[in-house]
Image (spheres, helix red, strand yellow):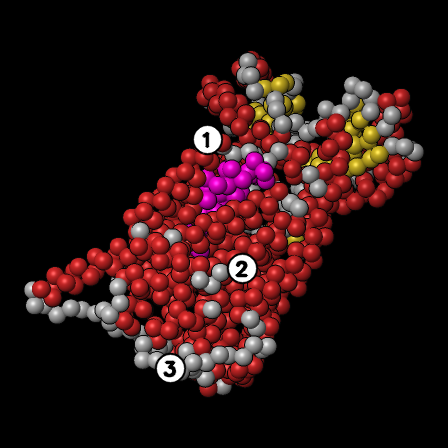
């Protein structure tokens, strides 16, 4: 495999136009096929986990599953509610929405306890997840009724309208993040290359890789359903790694060009770059893919979608760097050569870029502590990272529900006013029982007894009469219990425990042959967090194993493999610790523009741990590859460390700036979960590029010397005057 990047680059360089046309044909084909087959969205069944999932499956078996429901509220804009005017609005509203094909039923209006608000429950057709699509005509009719009654406030809230509002907000947020990241990325690349053409190449390949991955993800969704988050991840990771891989390749090609001083053709320079940077890109991409694949072990539809999106876009980015990038570089190189020839023919001096002489002043300063006092630098920097990681020990997880969504969404504002008037709508527990049909009456009687016990408990809504519904065949019965507290509150969680641990065992649980389970918003969130915590050791264990194995395979060194695992743990731990400091409390709410959940979104730590390991492997591979190359070119262990890290520092830092910009833009989004992901990724990349790669890694390698490559021994060759000339031999 070590020669594969070179062979591909050689073919692309010699058939440049074919390679370029082939790449863009591939992108168009991926998009075309994806659009033609469409996406297969995840269904309610795909989200079921734990006891709550079992309860939902039983309810669905009896046709008693949760239906998408909207609540339309009517109240006076000022003063007391005019009963006649409100009645007129209710009649008009009912007539309008009953004609909608998306509406299943409209219930009679319900008056709030203080008599100031009327609500009209509306049940939509179709499964629960389709509600956000079917709710659009209903929202339009509600708006028309609102316009026809200017003295009344007519609002609509419910899971369907909130889901639609969240999707709309997410789309606007992604547009905002693109407006931030694209200009900053272009500016960074212009500073690095000093050329508009060269800066445009990484952006072109990153965006085309994202387009191809989006098309492939649509096809993949027919095997692994798409819950709607895969696109976000493809854009996020695709822009980051797509630019990074191209950046590493471009910098190496320019370095070889400067070393050659015009003695090598554009095709030869591309082959030299492929021999080193190309192989590093392959190894790095495989490391990200393999580490991300451990998310499949979580057996969760969202994690599987995130893993699929990441794997696809990284794989496509690697392919673009190996195929079309060499072809583009050859064409750009020929253009440069023609310009140089024209200048020479006119008697003008030909400008050649000199090879960079080692480490720049800034990075030389940053490396000086590790160079002069490696032991002290290692101890101090490690202690700092451990101190940053310490708050992660107090990590609390919560499954964010609709109570945590941004109040900038109109449906959330209406939801707050709705639940203020009808607190019993905040949380509903559903107790599901399955039995033989001839026991239906007995099960209903015992469920009603459970409901009476709960109604007398202050944790439950005493003014909401418990209702028992039974399937037509009598096999399934469902008891609904209202709780007047937010889903993430201690009271709501305690009410769930009270049902599962006390009321259910004392009532329905005593009936032999009756299967029971509890679901609802609180139960779903609780069981989801428990499910993830149960999978966490398995995922992390495999992640550490595959990261170690990939590093040992890439560098033939057990010590380098152990170093990679430890340093990845250090950077991931520090970023998670800072995530807890900033987001688990309330002091940074104004600074970062969010409402604290008092905890971290349950999906964030596991996902970030896996992705951070993959991205850290990027830098590990590129930096250690340069060190290994310097060792093979005849340098001592100390010289190789300083040379490899010094020469890679600028490009690694430039790549880190791009990644930090991409991830940091997500901190400006509204969704707290996305804010947390963006913050943690940006902090981790920054710490990894600066503290780990410029302080901890060089200090550790300087202290270890040749022992870092155990059990293999560094194979040194005599130094040559043109290091690039031996580069092809150094990849075996």
Q: Report the span colored magenta.
A: 213-241
Label 3 or label 2, whichever lies nearer to me, is 3
Query: Quick check: 519 left or right of 630?
Result: right
Quadrant in which residue 664 is drawn: bottom left
Label 1 or label 3, whichever lies nearer to me, is 3
Secondary structure that dominates the magenta span: helix
Residue 116 drawn above or below residue 538: above
Q: Secondary structure at mark 3?
A: loop
Query: Circle 2 is placed at which residue position?
Result: 287
Q: Residue at x 54, y 54 (%)?
A: 289
Q: CA distance from mark 3 to mark 2?
A: 31 Å
User: Is 340 or 522 nearer to us in this picture?
Assistant: 340
* Visible residue check, residue 380: no
Rendering coords of residue 559 (x, y %): 59, 75
Query: Circle 3 is placed at which residue position?
Result: 719
Q: Residue at x 42, y 35 (%)?
A: 32
Which numbered disc flags the more N-terminal residue, 1 or 3?
1
Residue 627 drawn above or below residue 26: below
Q: CA distance from mark 1 to mark 3?
A: 56 Å
Q: Secondary structure at mark 1?
A: helix
User: Is 216 or 200 nearer to us in this picture?
Assistant: 216
Query: Quick check: 392 left or right of 351?
Result: right
Which numbered disc flags the more N-terminal residue, 1 or 2?
1
Query: Circle 1 is placed at which residue position?
Result: 36
């Amino acid at each position: 495999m070590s020669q594969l990047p070179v062979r591909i680059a050689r073919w692309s360089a010699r058939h440049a136009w074919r390679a370029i046309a082939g790449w863009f044909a591939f992108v168009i084909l991926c998009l075309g096929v994806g659009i033609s087959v469409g996406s297969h969205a995840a269904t309610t069944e795909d989200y079921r986990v734990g006891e709550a999932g079992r309860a939902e499956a039983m309810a669905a078996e009896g046709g008693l599953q949760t239906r998408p429901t909207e609540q339309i509220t009517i109240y006076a804009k000022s003063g007391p509610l005019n009963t006649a005017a409100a009645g007129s609005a209710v009649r008009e509203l009912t007539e309008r929405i009953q004609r909608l094909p998306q509406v299943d039923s409209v219930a009679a209006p319900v008056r709030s306890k203080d008599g100031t608000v009327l609500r009209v429950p509306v049940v939509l057709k179709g499964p629960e997840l389709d509600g956000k699509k079917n709710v659009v005509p209903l929202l339009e009719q509600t708006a028309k009724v609102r316009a026809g009654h200017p003295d009344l406030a007519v609002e609509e809230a419910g899971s369907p309208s909130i889901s639609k509002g969240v999707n709309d907000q997410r789309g606007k947020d992604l547009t905002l993040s693109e407006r931030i990241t694209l200009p900053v990325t272009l500016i960074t690349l212009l500073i690095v290359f000093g050329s508009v053409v060269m800066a445009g190449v990484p952006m072109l390949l990153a965006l085309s890789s994202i387009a191809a991955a989006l098309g492939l993800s649509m096809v993949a969704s027919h095997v692994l359903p798409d819950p709607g988050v895969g696109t976000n991840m493809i854009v996020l990771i695709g822009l980051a790694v797509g630019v990074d891989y191209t950046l590493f390749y471009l910098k190496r090609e320019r370095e070889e060009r400067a070393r050659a001083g015009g003695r090598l053709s554009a095709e030869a320079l591309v082959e030299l770059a492929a021999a080193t940077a190309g192989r590093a890109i392959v190894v790095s991409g495989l490391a990200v893919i393999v580490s991300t694949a451990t998310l499949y072990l979580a057996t969760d539809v969202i994690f599987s979608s995130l893993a699929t999106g990441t794997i696809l876009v990284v794989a496509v980015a690697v392919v673009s760097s190996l195929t079309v990038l060499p072809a583009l570089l050859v064409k750009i190189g020929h253009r440069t050569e023609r310009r140089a020839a024209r200048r020479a023919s006119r008697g003008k001096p030909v400008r050649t870029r000199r090879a960079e002489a080692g480490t720049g002043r800034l990075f030389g300063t940053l490396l000086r502590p590790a160079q002069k006092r490696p032991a002290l630098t290692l101890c101090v920097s490690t202690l700092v990272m451990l101190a940053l990681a310490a708050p992660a020990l107090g990590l609390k997880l919560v499954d964010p529900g609709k109570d945590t969504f941004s109040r900038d969404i109109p449906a959330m504002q209406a939801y707050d006013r709705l639940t203020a008037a009808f607190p019993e709508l905040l949380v509903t527990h559903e107790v599901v029982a399955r039995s033989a049909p001839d026991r239906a009456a007995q099960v209903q009687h015992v469920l009603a007894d459970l409901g009476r016990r709960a109604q007398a408990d202050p944790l439950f809504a005493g003014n909401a009469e418990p209702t028992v519904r039974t399937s037509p065949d009598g096999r399934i019965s469902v008891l609904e219990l209202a709780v007047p507290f937010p889903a993430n509150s201690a009271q709501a969680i305690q009410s769930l425990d009270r049902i599962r641990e006390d009321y259910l065992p004392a009532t329905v649980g005593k009936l032999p042959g009756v299967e029971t389970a509890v679901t609802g918003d609180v139960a779903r969130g609780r069981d989801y967090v428990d499910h993830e915590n149960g999978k966490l050791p398995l995922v992390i264990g495999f992640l550490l194993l595959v990261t170690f194995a990939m590093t040992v395979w890439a560098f033939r060194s057990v010590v380098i493999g152990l170093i990679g695992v430890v340093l990845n743990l250090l950077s991931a731990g520090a970023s998670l610790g800072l995530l807890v400091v900033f987001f688990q409390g309330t002091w940074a709410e104004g600074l970062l523009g969010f409402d604290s959940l008092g905890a971290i979104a349950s999906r964030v730590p596991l996902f970030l741990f896996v992705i951070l390991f993959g991205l850290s492997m990027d830098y590990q591979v590129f930096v250690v590859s340069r060190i290994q190359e310097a060792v093979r070119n005849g340098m001592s262990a100390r010289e190789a460390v300083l040379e490899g890290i010094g020469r890679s520092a600028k490009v690694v830092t430039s790549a880190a700036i791009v990644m930090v910009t991409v991830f940091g833009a997500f901190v400006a989004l509204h969704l707290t979960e996305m804010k947390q992901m963006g913050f943690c990724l940006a902090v981790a990349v920054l710490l990894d590029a600066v503290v780990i790669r410029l302080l901890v890694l060089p200090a550790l390698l300087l202290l270890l010397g040749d022992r870092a490559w155990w059990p293999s021994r560094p194979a040194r060759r005599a130094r040559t005057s043109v290091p690039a000339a031996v580069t092809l031999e150094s990849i075996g």
